[in-house]
Image: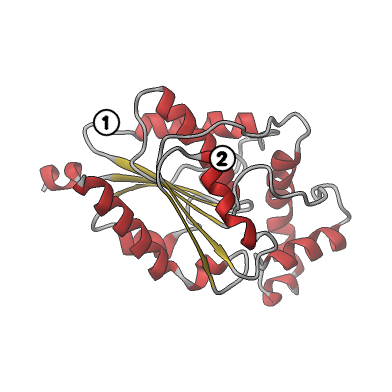
Amino acid sequence: MNTTISSKPQIFLLHYAGGDRNSFRPLVENLQNLFQIETPELPGRGGRMSEPFLKNKHAAVENLLNQIKMKRKKEVPYMIYGHSMGAILGLEICHTMENNADAPEYFVATGYPGPNIKNNPPIAGLPRAEFFEEVRKLGGLSDEVMEIGELLDFFEPVLRADFGLLENKENVPFSGKIQTPVYAVMGKNEQYALNIRNWKNYTTANCECQIVNGNHFFINQNFNYLAQVIKNVMNAAMAK
């Protein structure tokens, strides 16, 4: 039994803004028979609720990298998946892991068109009503949640912190290229969906881009599709 478990490839799931290690529960259920699943989590939420939020992208990348390195089993291949903020941070994590001679087999990125495309005004410092109106546009919170003040009280500090992390003026835009193959998916109702082929500018390896029905959180209705994508790309990578 232990031999079988240890031979499974690893997958690191990187959560989106406002998310935590439980954000991909349906995906975990779909993949757990084939992968050793790791769910790194940024401070200030979930099991790390008592820790202070991070302030910029560099700190978030370093924090997630430390968690990945602690869980990484170098005797098996691995891949990285990230949605939205998770994709932004995941790209830089792939780059660093390559420099450490432990490149992932694949990087699956959803809800993000790649670097240097999005040009939205910052929202982290907006008044509450305006802030949640912008969050609503992303499709991240249901209308039911938006009507319950206690739930908004719970989500507001985490969401503000994560948007602030991404909007920090100290952040340095990613300008290099990774050597890891990329599979990128966006919902057709996302603002920058038609820019998805921008990903080809940021990898020297194979890059496949797909647009599916839905908004920024299309993944919530497409976990089975996403799980199949992950299985397919890992099978293809391991067959080489």
Q: Is residue 8 left or right of residue 224?
A: left
For residue 221, the mark is: none
72 versus 110 height, above or below? above
Identity of the residue drawn at 78% across and 52% down: 120
- Left or right for 66, reference 57: left
> In which quadrant will I find the C terminus?
top left
In the displayed orientation, state which residue is furthest to the bottom: 144
- Mark 1 or 2 closer to N-term? 1
Mark 1: which secondary structure? loop
Extreme residue toward the right, this view: 127
Q: Residue 70: x, y in percent?
A: 38, 30
Residue marked by disc 2: 89
Q: Is residue 221 left or right of residue 169?
A: left
- Alpha carbon separation for disc pair 1 and 2: 21 Å
| Disc 1 residue crowd, few under 14, some 14–19, many 20+, Cα 10 Å | few
For the question of whether residue 36 can be seen, the reply is: yes
Residue 64 makes an appearance in the image: no
State the mark number for residue 74.
1
Other-residue count near label 2 (Cα within 10 Å), few / some / many at <14 / 14–19 / ≥20? many
The percent position of residue 223, horizontal first and vertical second, equals 43, 67
* 100 over 29 or under it: above or below: above
